[in-house]
Image (cartoon, helix red, strand yellow):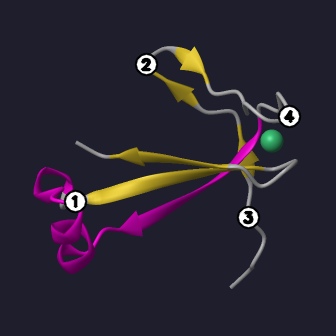
Amino acid sequence: MSNKIQSNEIIIKGKKLQCPVCDHTYFFTRRSLLNTRGLTFFNLDWANKDASNHICENCGYIYWFFNR
Ligand SMILES: [Zn+2]
């Protein structure tokens, strides 16, 4: 299995995602499972699902999106 991760342009709600730090528009994407224990602390039971992380290819800034 290859470890190579592809970066892509990300469209959210019809708008292209742009890094607020470096203005780059290519991001690595990964899925994160959100765990109930951590979320209860923040009282975020509504978000007890999975999330998408988009990581700026250029500077490493991470966007988090809950998948609803
Ligand atoms: Zn960036």
Residue 35 at x, y percent in the picture: 25, 75
Is disc 3's CB within 8 Å of ligand 1?
A: no
Q: CA distance from mark 3 to mark 4?
A: 20 Å
32 drawn magenta: yes
**Image quarter for residue 26?**
top right
**Does residue 67 appear to the left or right of 32 in the view shown?**
left
Residue 49 at x, y percent in the picture: 22, 59
Q: Earlier in the sequence, mark 3 or mark 1?
A: 3
Q: Amino acid at mark 3?
A: Ile
Please state the extent of the stretch shown in magenta in the rendering. Answer: 26-47
| Residues under numbered marks 1 and 4 in contact, where contact means CB atoms less than 8 Å apart | no
**Image quarter for residue 10?**
top right
Q: From this view, report whether residue 20 is shown above or below residue 48.
A: above
Q: Amino acid at mark 2?
A: Lys
Q: Amino acid at mark 4?
A: Cys
Q: Residue tagged by mark 3?
A: 5
Nearer to me, 25 or 47: 47
Residue at horizontal 21%, vertical 70%? 41
Residue at horizontal 19%, vertical 79%? 37
Residue at horizontal 15%, vertical 69%? 40
Instruction: Name the mark on residue 13.
Output: 2
Is disc 4's CB within 8 Å of ligand 1?
A: yes
**Does residue 12 appear to the left or right of 47 in the view shown?**
right
SS category of the residue bearing label 3: loop
